[in-house]
Image (cartoon, rainbow, N blue to C red):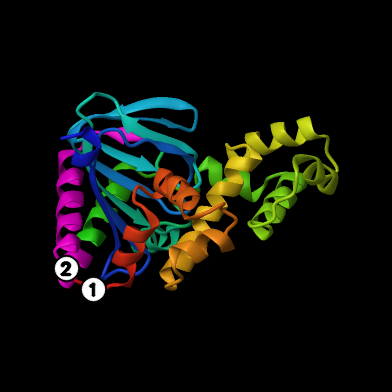
Amino acid sequence: MAAEAREVARYWQHAAVKGVDLLRARFITHRYGRHAHETYTFGLIECGVEEFDYGGSLLRAGPGAIALLNPEVVHTGHAATASGWSYRVLYPEVGVVAGVAAQLGWRGTPHFPQTIFYDPASAGLLRSAHGAAEHGDMLASSELLTAALARLLRAHAAAGPADAVIRLARAPAAVRSACDILSERLADPPTLADLATATGLSQFALLRAFRAETGLPPHAYLNQQRVRHARLLLDAGVPPAEVAARTGFADQAHLTRHFKRVVGVPPGAYQRERLQPAR
């Protein structure tokens, strides 16, 4: 059996807690491209080793490790060994985490300064919360998720938003303008020369500033925004082929390639999970 055939991934919405997505996967040859999430990413490695670039640092997470990624920090992901890795991931929106933090008496939006750590108590809670959600236990999954987030906040979080979120909020006007233009013109993006003219910078200066603020060059940022918008359209029931056309991808295969490099599953599988009744 080919290595690719042994890969499996499921990506779905939490049935009991709005604003939380979940992934359970075993990857061998799959590689995530450079991207960032609007949400937090809490991953628990169950076997194997994942290697990923996170904010410019190359990290490895082995069995039992928890990886805590802050919103809008560019990262990758791939197997560190030929046997691949298996993991469970929760993607809670910022408001979900901030809401639990507020109940603990925190002010503002927390961030996690340490990316990888080994904490059996937190790992056990994450595994139980994820497993209960996977089996559709509404009460247990919501209780366990709250307990897991509270444990992670108390043990590993710091007050105040992550540096990446602050940088984007305070990005120079030219970069903010370029981001807005790209987000508004997904299907008909400008050339780099046009983008530079619109922002009042030279092409080289724009490239340098854009990468410094977002962690990505403009074309990669554009594809990330296309994938984010594609998810909204898929959630609304729009067929993948139409989603590809509306978000500026050349065809459905082009959408699938970029979508899977960010989300971990193809758009069709993603949509089937989103549109089916809660389990």
Residue lying at the far bottom of the rendered structure: 277
Q: Nearer the viewer, residue 14 or 34?
A: 34
The residue that label 1 is drawn on is 278
| Residue 131 located within the stretch drawn in magenta | yes
The residue that label 2 is drawn on is 136
Earlier-in-chain disc, 2 versus 1: 2
Identify the image quadrant of residue 103. bottom left
Q: Which residues are magenta?
A: 115-143
Measuring from the top left, give residue 241's x and y in whole percent. Answer: 48, 62
Quadrant housing the C terminus: bottom left
Quadrant housing the N terminus: top left
Residue 62 seen in the figure: yes
The secondary structure making up most of the magenta span is helix
Residue 114 seen in the figure: no
SS of the residue under disc 2: loop
Measuring from the top left, give residue 99's x and y in whole percent. Answer: 39, 64
